[in-house]
Image (cartoon, helix red, strand yellow):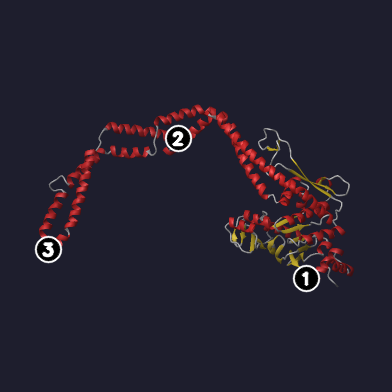
Amino acid sequence: MLKSLSIKNYALIERTEASFGAGLNIVTGETGAGKSIFVGALGLLLGDRASSDLIRKGENKAIVEGVFDVADRRDVLEILERGDLDAADELIVRRELSRKGANRNFVNDSPAPLTVVKALGDRLVDLHGQHEHQSLLRQATHVEFLDAFADAAEPLARYREARRALRAKTDELAELREREATLKERKEFYDFQLKEIDRVDPTENEDEEIEAELSVLENAERLFEAAANAFRTTYDDDRSAYSRLNEAREEFEEAARFDPAFAERLEELDSAIALVESVANFARDYRGAADLDPRKLDALRERAAELSRLKKKYGGELATVFERRDEMRREVELATDFEANVGAIVEEIERRRGEASAAAKRLSEIRRGAAKNLSEACERALATLGLEGATFATTISTTPADDDDADALTIDGAFVKSNARGCDEVEFLLAANAGEDAKPLAKVASGGEVSRIMLALKSVLARANEARTLIFDEIDVGVSGRIARKVGETLRDLSTREQVLAITHLPQIAGLADAHYAVEKVEQEGRAVSRLRKLTDDERVREVAKLLSGETITDSALESARDLIGKPA
C-alpha cells in the first residue's frame, strides 16, 4: 500500500506531499491543473525512464519519493534480497533527476539500479491510464489478463525455460548448417597445420625448459672454470678454506685445555668445516658433470628454433599453440563426422521440442480451464457496471505451422506456431447488448465500454492475485449519470480488497471517496505551481459540488454533493 508521496521540483510542482490510506482515494482537479503531472510523477516512482526536461525551470534537481507498507510481502522481500538491499515493513523508493544527467535511484536510502526500482513498482502498483485502457483493443494483451486470472506464472515460466532450451539447440543446428561449407573447405588446411604441429610434437613448458638448459650449455666453459676454482679454493689446496679451518680447530682444542671458552666454540667450527666441505663437494661434482658437447648444444638450439616458429605462427605462446591445435582438431572432427553431429543435434532438438510441447500443452490446459470462469466473472462485473445484457467471451485458438518452422510445437499431433507466451492465441469478444453476436473488442467496444471492461477485468483479477495499489487515471472516460455511479461503486468495492487511487472528473465517483485530494494550480511569485492537497470534509463537499455545477457553486449543487457523499447538511 502506498502510504505517502513526496514530489519536489517536478514539472509545475514545486513541492507537494500527501499521505494515503486504505480504501478509495479520489483525486480531482480542473483541466490543466496538473493531474497528468501527478500521474507522471507516480510513473517515474514506479520505474519509468525520465529526462531532465521534467525538472522544474530554474532548479537543478527533481525528487519523487514514495513510502509503501510492505509488511508480509514475501515477493518484495525476495527482490530486495536479490538486490542486496535492506528490508523492513516500510519500503522507501526515491528517484532523483539531475540536469547534469546523473539520475539516481534509492531503495531504503541505498543506491539501487533502475531495474530493481521497476521490479518493485511492478509488484506494488498497477497504474492504468487511458492508453492502458486502449491496450485492451490489442489482442496481444489478452493472454496476459487470462494468465493473471489463471495464476499461470509458474507454468508459463516452465514453458519459457523449455522453449529457451529448444531454441538454443535449433540455433546451434542453424549455425552448424551455415558452417558446413566452410568446415569442409578448411578441413584440408587444418589437416596440414595439425601435421605441422604434430611433427614438432611440443610438450608443456618445453620452451622454458630448453631456454634454461641452453643458458647452462652456452656458458659451460665459464661454469666449469667457476666450479674448478671454487673447489680449489675451498678444498683442493694446501691453503684452502677447509685446511685452514681444520688448523684453527686444532688451535682451539689446544687452547681449550687452559680456557673452557674455546671449547664452547668448537661446535661452531665443526659446522663451518661441514658447510665448506658441502660447497666443495658441489663444486667438484659440478666440475665433473659439466657437459661441453657442442652437438647437444646445436640440437637444443635447433629444437628451440622449431618451437619458436610454432609460437610465432600460432599465437606467441606455447599454450596458445596447444589451444589452437585442440580447436583445429575439433573442427576437423566436426567436418569428418558432420552428418553424425547433425543427427545428434536433431535428435536433441526433437527431445527438447517434446518437452516444450508438453509444457505448452499444460499451459494451454490451465488457460482453457480458467477462460470460462474469467468470462463469467467479467459478465457479472459488466452487469454491475451497467452492461446487464453484455456477453463476454474468452476464446483460445492455435495457428498451424509448417514442418520446417523452427519454433513450431506439436500439440495433439499437430504442428502449431509458438511464441514467448505459448501456442495459444487468446482473444476477448464482446456483445454489448443481448441477442448480438460476440465480436472482437476493437470492432464493437466504445470508449466508455473499454474503460468499463478494463475496470471489470481489474475487479475480477483483484480477487485472484496478490494485493497491489491500483491507480486509475480517467477510468470514467465516456461514462456519465447512472453508469458513473456504477463505476464508482465498483471502485469502492474493489477498494475493500486493494488500495485504490482514482483520478476522476465525475461527481458520482468522487462522492464515494474514503479520502479526497485535489490537484490545484496556483500562482506564486509570478509562476504557476501545481500541488496535491487532501481536502477537509467541507472542502470535499464544495469540490464535488464544483464537479456538478462548475465554478459557480449553487445551493442545490451543495445539497446534491452532500447527497452523493452521504454527508448531512
Q: Are marks 1 and 3 in contact (CB under 8 Å)?
A: no
Q: Position of residue 195 (x, y in %)?
A: 44, 28
- In the orientation shown, which residue stands out farthest toward the bottom? 569
Q: Position of residue 480 (x, y in %)?
A: 86, 58
On residue 375, which mark appears? none
Res. 220 visible in picture: yes
C-alpha separation, residue under disc 1 versus residue under disc 3: 112 Å
Among the two numbered marks 2 and 1 on one chain, the one whose residue lies closer to the N terminus: 2
| Amino acid on which disc 3 is placed | Asp
Residue denoted by label 2 = 314
* Disc 1: which residue: 536
Tell me which label, 1 or 3, sits earlier in the chain.
3
Figure check: 268 above or below 184: below
Q: Residue at x 79, y 53 (%)?
A: 377
| Picture quarter with the C terminus | bottom right
Q: Earlier in the sequence, mark 2 or mark 3?
A: 3
Question: Is there a contact, CB below 8 Å, between mark 2 and mark 1?
Answer: no
Task: Please tell me which residue lies in front, 210 or 270.
Answer: 270
Give the image location of residue 7, x and y in percent: 69, 63
Vertical relation: 204 (above or below) 560: above
* Eye-nearest disc, 2 or 3: 3
Task: Please tell me how crowded label 3 is: few (under 14), some (14-19), or many (20+) other residues with Cα within 10 Å.
Answer: few
Tag 3 residue:
259
Q: Is residue 363 left or right of residue 337?
A: right
Q: In the image, what residue type sits under mark 1?
A: Thr
Q: Are marks 2 and 3 in contact (CB under 8 Å)?
A: no
Disc 2 residue type (three-letter): Tyr
Measured as percent of width and height from the top left, residue 278 is found at 21, 48
In which quadrant of the rendered view does residue 118 lie?
bottom right
